[in-house]
Amino acid sequence: MWSWIDTLVQGLMLGGLYALFAMGQSLMFGVMRLTNTAHGDFLILAAFAGFSLLSAFGLHGVCATAAIQLALLPLAFVFGYGLQRLVLNGTLGKDPLPSLVVSFGLSIVIQNMLTEVFTSDPRALDTGELNMQSLTLGDHLSVGILPLSIFIIAILVVAAMQWLFGRTALGRAFRATSDDKEAAQLMGLDARHVYGLATGLAFVLVAVAGTLQGMRTTFSPTDGPAILLLAFESVIIGGLGSFWGAFAGALILGTTQSIGFRLDPGWGVWFGHIVFLLMLALRPQGLFPKTR
Amino acid sequence: MSALLETHGLTAHYGDFQVLFGVDFVVEPGEVVALIGANGAGKSTFLKSVTGLLKAPRDSVRFGGETISGLAPDKIVRGGIAMVPEGRRLFPSLSVEENLMIGGFTRRAGAWNLNAVYKLFPILRERRHTPGTALSGGQQQMVAIGRALMSNPQLLICDELSLGLSPIVVKEIYDALPSLTQDGLSLIVVEQDVATARAVSQRLYCMQEGRVSLTGRSQDVTHEQISKAYFGI
Amino acid sequence: MKNLQFSVLRASRGSQLALGAGLLLAAVGCTLPWWGQSSWMREFNQIACYFIFASMWNLLAGYGGMVSIGQQAYLGLGGYLMLILSNLCGVNPFVAIPISALLTALAAIPVSQLAFRLKGGYFAIGTWVIADVFRLSFANLGVVGGGSGTSLTALADIERSTRESVTFWMTLSAVVATIALTYFFLRSKQGLALMAIRDSEIASESQGIDVGRVKLGVYVVSALGAGVAGALYFLGNLRISPDAAFSVNWTAFAIFMVMIGGLGTIEGPIVGAVIFWALNKFFSDYGTWYLVGLGLMAIVVTLVFKQGLWGYLQARLGWRIFLVQRRLELRQPYPLNGKTSS
């Protein structure tokens, strides 16, 4: 029985990481109705950025990795803001096609450029000893320090996003612009700037998630799409418009996959997809939807 | 004394289709000007051109002596124009208080703040945490007006305040307007209800098929003149 | 009120010339197996399948307003069904193609019930998830070779030149059929309904159009076409694997072809396929850089020419080969300023 509980715990920890995958996407879709099909690829790009910075400076160990990751965050914000204002703002509108095609094109560009520069060999971000360490809970369970830290970071990020949206002027600006762009402009809000800020923030979240992914496991240039699907499924299972919902969806997805992998390694991801499709069939609005 | 808002020969098109044909319009500081006309006369298009939601031709709109035609709406609003949009357009994701706060996003110096708005419309203080759209029509209108006031504008545009509201509520809302002008706020009141518009304004304009068909002092203009101008007969 | 005199035009000189040229080309093409090389027929088979798939994507997205990144699910399904029918059920592979296409179309019906619960951008990603489910399912199916796939053995007995010729003729017919059927469908009442729905679902419903049924119809037809493309492709390829069958690259190339060629036009995928084939021929040796180039092109075209390159040229120069609209030609100018002269 304990081994099943262990599987469950692993699944929850995995879900924490998936929640971080989902945050950036939930934010962008929530504010702008923009579907960024390159979401996972930007995540991997962040991991590779961390990797190259570490290699460039010849740094090792978990502290160096963490420092590099923190340094990446403002860069990610600027990059996201610029991308939104220069490229993605032009794709917004009633028709989802332009944003889909443009982000799809970006996905292809990123994957192939990364393959060109780094080859398709899997890489990892150096975490020193951290990957091996674990915390023992009682006599029967242990959980890795890194997965647990990721889980805790996920909770903090979700809470922070909830606070930002609910209690700050920026959050009000996001919600208002998302509700009614014209009316928001009549309040003096510059919609283009608001969208830029949203994407900038989303990319910070993507950078956080990407680097944690790189620390947890190996990554390669073509991993992006799988991550996109995980983020998307978490959001749909949890319910659109809710950060805690996406968190819940991610936990469900993580545990489902964990159980699936245990039953048969080939069916792990498949199980997650099936749970997603079941949710779509039985409760399409997700578990905790906010009316949007 | 230069006018607060003036338009010269303002035209507007939706694609190839022309909707406004040379509108001249003036609002002096501290005035209440009414804009009346039937549906489709061009009132909404006129307002969109003034607030920048529709791009106006060069030099056709001036506010406070400066050309605002061609500017983005958020810049125009930050310059001192605020609008209570037709149909209120409150933000469903925001509570009453948050709707008011977002109105104050454009921080200009002035007397209007949350407390002042709650003093004007006390019922809103009780409902401050309710989602904006869960209120009655009249209360929503109060929120919309309060929201517009929060930016401390020089010019407040009220687009069809009476739409969808009962006469008692309409009277309650319009009774609140005169006190606003005491501090020098100018108003453009767009209305289909001609009697209300005449009662509350000093001057009025009537539009018909994209043109100004009548203008004059509200007290001097006759009922007959308005009928002709309104319907174009 | 003045009496307006007008006529409804359904064809133009340009369109009639192009139709003639196309028929001539198809007739000449039929004779290819007698004077052409194997590699040409193989290449034609490949580009034709890309074209058919792109046309189906165009039908779904450009006309139906449903952007999908998962139509490869049906392409792969068509391929695998053809293989299963041929290898395991002893059906003649050439006969298996239409059967597997029909089965694929049938499979699309229940799948659509799930997919249609999502809208817009999330519909697109949802279709990708479904395609991934298909991929994983077949990758775990040992009887068709699992993750590494398997070969089409049922054609081993047939002489090579016969096999190549029949494959070629079937592919050529499929291409002609795709163009013809799309053209006639869009000129029909259903086609008009589709374009109305694309412009506004609510307005269409208020005119009595059953939006749900029309959308389902388009989705199923698109799946049918994708199934044909998949079956034909892997017939020519002689080998199938889950990664090749369900790769998202199919959609990526379809998007490229349609965006370059022109969204929501019939000529679009043709023009796009020709350009794609040319680019492939000259640049595919550059591997990843070639793909980067394609991606950048698609981005630039979408941002700058919202209707695709051909669509832009059409609008600027008035070129139209396949006219699906009914154009109103007035014999007297209609007064635009709203005033009727007394």
Image: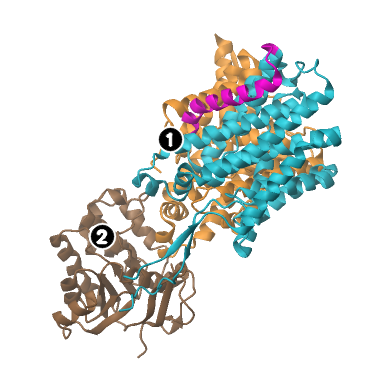
Chain colours: A orange, B brown, C cyan
Say which of B206 and B68 sits in front.
Answer: B206
SS at badge 2? helix
SS at badge 1? helix
Say which of B153 and C87 sits in front.
Answer: C87
Q: Is residue C107 covered in magenta?
A: yes
Q: Is residue A118 covered in magenta?
A: no
| Kind of residue at badge 1 | Arg
| Kind of residue at badge 2 | Gln
Cα–Cα gap, marks 2 and 1: 42 Å
**Residue at image point 33% right, 78% down:** C341
From the image, state whether disc 2 or disc 1 is nearer to you. 1
What is the span of residues highlighted in magenta in the rendered image?
Answer: C88-117
Residue C213 has which mark?
1
Left or right: where does residue B187 sit relative to residue A34? left
Quadrant of the snapshot with the N terminus of chain C: bottom left
Residue C320 spot, x, y in % from top left: 61, 56
Q: Is the C-beta separation of discs 2 and 1 under 8 Å? A: no
Answer with the quarter of the image where residue C277 lies: top right
Residue C124 spot, x, y in % from top left: 55, 39
Answer with the quarter of the image where residue C60 lies: top right
Q: Chain of mark 2?
A: B
Q: Is the residue A9 above or below the residue B189 in the image?
A: above
Residues packed near mark 2 inside 10 Å, few (<14), some (14 to 19) or many (20 plus)? many
**Residue at image point 62% right, 23% down:** C100
Q: Which residue is mark 2?
A: B141
Q: Is the residue B219 above or below the residue C274 in the image?
A: below
Left or right: where does residue B106 sit relative to residue B119? right
